[in-house]
Amino acid sequence: MLKEFADYITYALLKLEPTSHLGDALNFFIYDTLKIFLLLSTIVYGVAVIRAYFPPEKTKRILSHKREFIGNTMAALLGIVTPFCSCSAVPLFIGFVEAGVPLGVTFSFLISSPMVNEIALIMLWGLFGWKIALIYTGTGVVLAIVSGIVIGKLKMEKYVQDYVWEIKAGAGDIVPTSFREKLVYARDYTAELLKRIWPYVIIGIAVGGIVHGYIPTDFVVKYAGRDNPFAVLVAVLIGIPLYSNAAGMIPVVQALVGKGMAMGTVLAFMMSVTAISFPEAVILKNVLKMRLIYTFFGIVAVGIIIVGYLFNFIL
């Protein structure tokens, strides 16, 4: 329904050509704006209702294992069964931080959720076989765990925005008891969070729409083809400004492989688009300070580049 509405506005009402750059970019912007805000509202509200049943200390106990590696592993595995795009995973990330879950553990979830999920596994299996699907899933989980551990060791809690800690500090002051109170709490929390982040979401989607509409697939192949020894690095740098979920990237992956791009380069491109997109950074800016965002992107990007070259070597 949302896609049909976006198509109607773009092509029927505004009479733009479906093949035009402007039409493609505007259609992407309208559709993704509707989709992301619907997802954000639904996910934030649902998470807030669930949080009302799980006091912060209980959540903290589940993911804050005395062996941090186990907490990172649990968070990464949780990401597999919560197949959100990177922007939609942010509300859960915020909820974990507010609950007092260690920062590195929350990042393991934030990396795993958009990049590795059952939808991507099934689609990759169907298109490229079980080896590619399992290698992608396995390396994605390992990347999420290792990146989370590294971020945790850096002790960067001071680069989380102050208001997040204020929410955390006040989280235990009022505990909703009745079901009605829980729904009211969830409604108010959702409204407050959306009011704080909506401009950043709009800016991020607009940038993604411009890139989507004006940068053709051939551009990526030209600069990240098999003959370029820096292809993986180039593919990751091209992928970061883009935005999509894992399922949406599978057709692009198939097209790029069909155009002759190496499998490792294509999968590194897919990882960079899904795990460290520019729109995600724009939203995270309202929660994290820039030094932590740069660190997060840098660690994950380096990991993806290593995985890409490893894939090319193995495959």
Image (tube, helix red, strand yellow):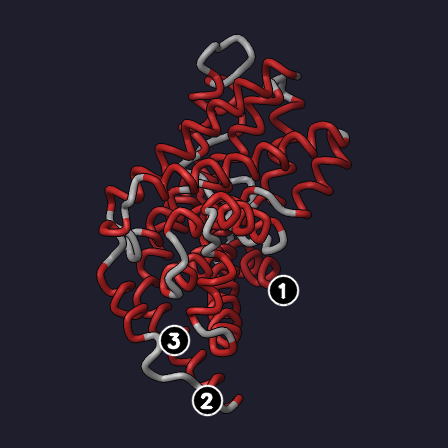
Is tag 1's residue or tag 3's residue first in the polypeptide sequence? 1
Whole-percent x, y for residue 303 in the image? 45, 29
Q: Nearer the viewer, mark 3 or mark 2?
A: 2
Count neighbours of disc 3 (C-alpha within 10 A) and say few if under 14, some if 14 to 19, many if 20 or more: some
Quadrant of the rendered structure where residue 230 is? Answer: top left
**x, y (%) of residue 191?**
38, 75
Is residue 243 something that shows in the picture? yes
User: What residue is at 38 percent from the left and 80 percent from the top?
Assistant: 188
Residue 130 occupies quadrant:
top right
Give the distance between the C-alpha atoms of the residues marked 3 and 2, in whole angstroms: 12 Å
The secondary element bearing badge 2 is classed as helix
Residue 218 image position (x, y, % from top left)? 53, 24
Neighbour class for label 1 at 10 Å: few (<14), some, many (≥20)? few
How many angstroms separate mark 1 from mark 3 (CA)?
Answer: 27 Å
Q: Which residue sits at x=31%, y=37%? A: 295
Can the viewer see residue 114 in this picture?
Answer: no
> What residue do we see at 47% from left, 78% from top?
52
Label at residue 189: 3
Mark 3 or 2 closer to N-term?
2
Relative to residue 4, is residue 10 drawn left or right?
A: left
Q: Amino acid at mark 1?
A: Met
Give the label on residue 181, or none: 2
Q: Are marks 1 and 3 in contact (CB under 8 Å)?
A: no
- Give the Cα separation between the discs numbered 1 and 2: 32 Å
User: In front of the other: label 1 or label 2?
Assistant: 2
Which residue corresponds to the image point at 59% horizontal and 48% vertical from the top-left? 77
Furthest toward the front, the residue is: 66
Q: Earlier in the sequence, mark 1 or mark 2?
A: 1
- Reading the image, the residue beneath label 1 is 1
- The vertical placement of 100 against 23, above or below, is below
